[in-house]
Image (cartoon, rainbow, N blue to C red):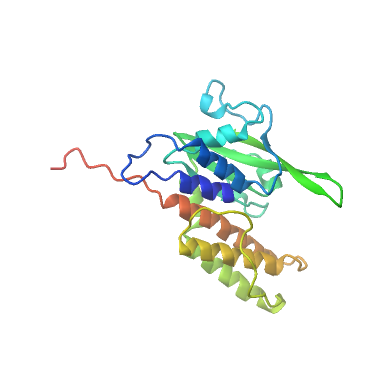
Amino acid sequence: MRLALWLAVEGRPAPGASWGGTAAPVAGAARALGAAADGDDPHTLREGSGDLPRGAEFWEPSPGALVDVVARWLGPGCRAVALLPSDDDGAALPVLAPRHALTAGECLLVTSDGAHVLAVPHVERYGSAWESGHAVAWSLHEVGPWERRIEDALGSLEDARAALRHALIVAAPMLPTLADDASGPAGPLPELDEEALVALAEAARARALVAALPTSPRVAGVERAARRLLSAVTWHVTAAQEPPQRPSSTAR
């Protein structure tokens, strides 16, 4: 989710710049990659990663060079959305999305330079109970245009916030009191508007509220609505960077 937010924010054209202009500096890509990683956990690419077309340099990085891929994505006009899907809400995934996107429980949709890709993290734990970490290997898969389908599935940010409020009301008799100091998502975030920050905090609090509760339809409803809200925040941020309207050829 943090990587999607960084890609969307860093991918905005600079004031006065034309849409689709010079690519963002690699330093921005490094920040985005660092924001997506937890601590020092390694993030790499799987060899033979994805069903991507041969000969397309944009989607053919060297195995392991994830930062190079992010650098290529991170140009003006890059749009990204994070999804946290489960078996009961996979309809938000694009056509032909791999099944392991559901198994992973999270994935990233990116459109950049006219290409559309779905990135799925595969997380493996290593170490002992006293000192452990997570190695993340990403697979990349070419997909079709996804924005219209995501817009239909997620709705507006206010729609997603209202859905979470409703889920919390329905589950209220089962819920403990949530501490006022419940924190939002961990890790560095780019500069976001107030509405996005409030929504992130609401979703994080709701997930913390139900994390230790026994599974039930009402609890699952809160968790599902919270995941939808997190995804809706990334859509809200990336949809805010609409291309400027070009004047009509008949305009005077």
Horizontal relation, residue 81 to residue 220: left or right: left
Please tell me which residue lies in front, 85 or 137: 137
From this view, report whether residue 213 is shown above or below residue 5: below
Residue reaching furthest left?
252
Q: Quadrant of residue 142?
A: top right
Please tell me which residue lies in front, 4 or 85: 4
Image spot of residue 148 (x, y percent): 46, 47
The residue at the point 50 percent across, 43 percent down is 146
Horizontal relation, residue 168 to residue 150: left or right: right
Residue 143, visible in the rendered structure: no
Q: How many marks?
A: 0
The residue at the point 32 percent across, 39 percent down is 18
The residue at the point 51 percent across, 41 percent down is 28
The residue at the point 70 percent across, 75 percent down is 175
Residue reaching furthest front?
27
Please tell me which residue lies in front, 85 or 112: 112
Image spot of residue 48 (x, y percent): 66, 27
Residue 123, visible in the rendered structure: yes
From this view, report whether residue 6 is shown above or below residue 201: above
Quadrant of the image containing the C terminus: top left
From this view, report whether residue 248 is shown above or below residue 155: above
Horizontal relation, residue 17 to residue 50: left or right: left
Image spot of residue 116 (x, y percent): 51, 36
